[in-house]
Image: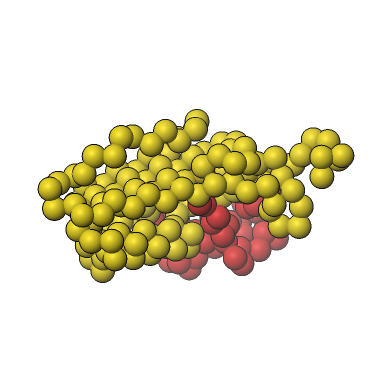
């Protein structure tokens, strides 16, 4: 098992009611599975996911080096 | 190519314009300014938040990729975070290139890609007095 920091930003944080959370997971667990476990009912449609600051697919394993998993709603900088 | 990305909590203060090399023939500076209308109403400003570590990485990646298509000599990006009142700059991009076409193309492509991938979000700062709307 590894310990990862789940981060939520902007509208994702508003919907979830939290901005960060430490979770234990297996390295072969996917971001989708982790989120379903800690926030059942949260619909990740229109939300992208990043692992260690790199965009990843929701159904790819987080990997043994994962430290941060971030939930990123559509960006709007500028 | 020189590049610098700054995320700053206070007002953007543009450093002095000084060409990165004697090959620079064009310096282009773009400022994104917060407007009073956002969506259907008026706002006092915009509040920006970022996933800062990733925002820096994404800017670096986009700058590297964009410079392959549009070679330049130098780029400076300053994005403001926190509350930005109407009329103030939230973004400054300064591009130095040999020719204006490269600078213009680079700047446009950088900002377009920023708006797709750089994890920065804005939210409206509502006016406090309903009479002001």
Q: Nearer the viewer, residue A8 or A59?
A: A8
Q: Residue at x 37, y 46 (%)?
A: B77
Q: Nearer the viewer, residue A54 or B65?
A: B65
Position of residue A35 measured from the top left corner of the image (x, y, whole percent): 58, 56
Q: Residue at x 61, y 59 (%)?
A: A36
Q: Nearer the viewer, residue A19 or B15?
A: B15
Q: Is residue A15 left or right of residue A61?
A: right
Q: Number of callouts in the render?
A: 0
Position of residue B96 measured from the top left corner of the image (x, y, whole percent): 26, 52
User: Is there any visible trace of residue A44 in the rendered image?
Assistant: yes
Q: Residue at x 87, y 39 (%)?
A: B131
Compared to residue B121, the image places residue B98 above or below, namely below
Chain that the image shows in red: A
Q: Residue at x 56, y 60 (%)?
A: A74
Q: Nearer the viewer, residue B40 or B29?
A: B29
Give residue B133's quadrant in the image.
top right
Q: Colour of chain B?
A: yellow
Position of residue B35 measured from the top left corner of the image (x, y, whole percent): 63, 48
Q: Is residue B68 left or right of residue B91?
A: left
Compared to residue B13, the image places residue A60 above or below, namely below
Q: Is residue B81 left or right of residue A2?
A: right
């Amino acid at each position: 098992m590894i310990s990862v920091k789940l981060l939520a930003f902007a509208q994702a944080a508003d919907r979830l009611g939290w901005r960060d959370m430490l979770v234990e997971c297996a390295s072969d667990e996917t971001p989708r599975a982790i989120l379903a476990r800690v926030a059942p009912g949260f619909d990740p449609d229109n939300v992208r996911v990043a692992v260690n600051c790199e965009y990843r697919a929701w159904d790819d394993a987080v990997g043994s080096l994962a430290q941060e998993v971030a939930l990123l709603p559509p960006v709007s900088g500028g | 190519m020189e590049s610098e990305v700054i995320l700053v909590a206070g007002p953007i203060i543009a450093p002095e314009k000084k060409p990165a090399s004697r090959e620079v023939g064009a310096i282009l500076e773009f400022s994104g300014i917060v407007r009073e209308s956002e969506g259907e109403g008026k706002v006092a400003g915009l509040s920006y938040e970022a996933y800062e570590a990733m925002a820096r990485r994404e800017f670096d990646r986009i700058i590297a990729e964009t410079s392959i298509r549009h070679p330049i000599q130098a780029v400076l990006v300053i994005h403001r975070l926190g509350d930005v009142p109407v009329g103030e700059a939230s973004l400054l991009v300064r591009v130095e290139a040999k020719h204006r076409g490269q600078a213009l193309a680079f700047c446009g492509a950088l900002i377009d890609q920023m708006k797709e991938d750089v994890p920065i979000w804005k939210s409206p700062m509502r006016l406090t007095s309903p009479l002001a709307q």
